[in-house]
Image (cartoon, rainbow, N blue to C red):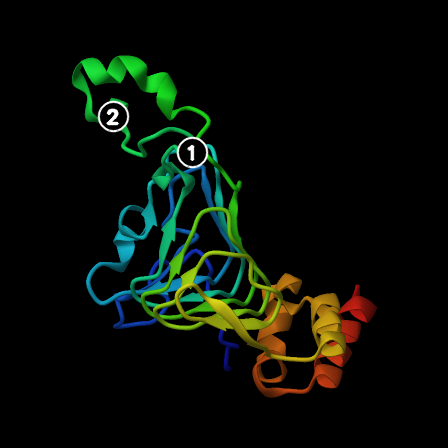
Amino acid sequence: MTHAVPPPDPSTLHPMPGQPRVVLLKPLVTSPLVEVGDFTYYDDPDDATAFETRNVLYHYGPERLVIGRYCALATGVRFLMNGANHRLDGPSTFPFPSMGGSWAENVDLLVDLPSRGDTVVGHDVWIGNGATVMPGVRIGHGAVVAAGSVVVKDVPDYGVVGGNPARLIRRRFDDETVDRLLAVAWWDWPVEHVTAHQRTIMAGTVDELEAAGRALRDAV
């Protein structure tokens, strides 16, 4: 008697046997200010498990980092959070109270720094090696960020961006197709349905993807 192989477990820290450089981030992160969806992974040959301390920088709150499901983050991807900001409204940008001593008495000078809010990465996003995402940026679903990019402004759904500062190179699909893909939202499917249709998700047509979505709705 044979038994069906179950789908991957999203709570597994190292999903790829023999590859400790790859971690799923959801079971790894501990900060209440970081939210990561199922199956989003980070790849780093040095210490992938140090993602929160080495790759999420200046995270003093209250802004959150939200990363969706099924995202691929290459080695050295960094998120600079709002704590990296300095005052721009005075003659100097130097953060004197941070240095301690008697300067710390003026800690109120570090309150109400410029903020763009939460940093949000959508579902099914691929961010290339060494890319940096600046505070408050929103990266849309299905987007691709080229290696070495510095993302300083929002990226549209299914956009491909690159450079420093990152600029829109192209959209992966036309507007009508993007709307259809967003309506299907395959990343919201139960993992069993994703498993059954992974070939369509990776290499099928939008028509086939929509058909798989209808099959799921009809089964409910």
Q: Position of residue 186 (x, y in %)?
A: 65, 69
Please tell me in which quadrant of the rendered image residue 60 appears: top left
In the rendered structure, the answer to whether residue 220 lies left or right of residue 125 reads right
- Work out whether residue 7 can be spotted: no
Residue visible at 40% across and 35% down?
A: 88
The C terminus, quarter of image: bottom right
Secondary structure type for disc 1: loop
**In percent of the image, x 70 and y 67: which residue is there?**
182
Residue 156: percent from left, percent from top: 61, 64
At mark 2, the secondary structure is helix
In whole angstroms, how far apart are the C-alphas of marks 2 and 1?
20 Å
Select label 2 or label 1 by which is in front.
2
Q: Is residue 186 above or below residue 95?
A: below
Residue 96: numbered disc:
2
User: Does residue 121 appear to the left or right of 190 in the view shown?
Assistant: left
Earlier in the chain: of badge 2 and badge 1, it is 1
Residue type at numbered disc 1: Gly
Q: In the image, is 152 to the left or to the right of 177?
A: left
Q: Residue at x 31, y 53 (%)?
A: 55
Q: Examine the rendering and report whether any part of residue 108 can be seen.
A: yes
Residue nearer the viewer, 122 or 167: 167
Residue 179 found in image quarter: bottom right
Residue furthest toward the right?
218
Q: Which residue is tagged 1?
A: 61
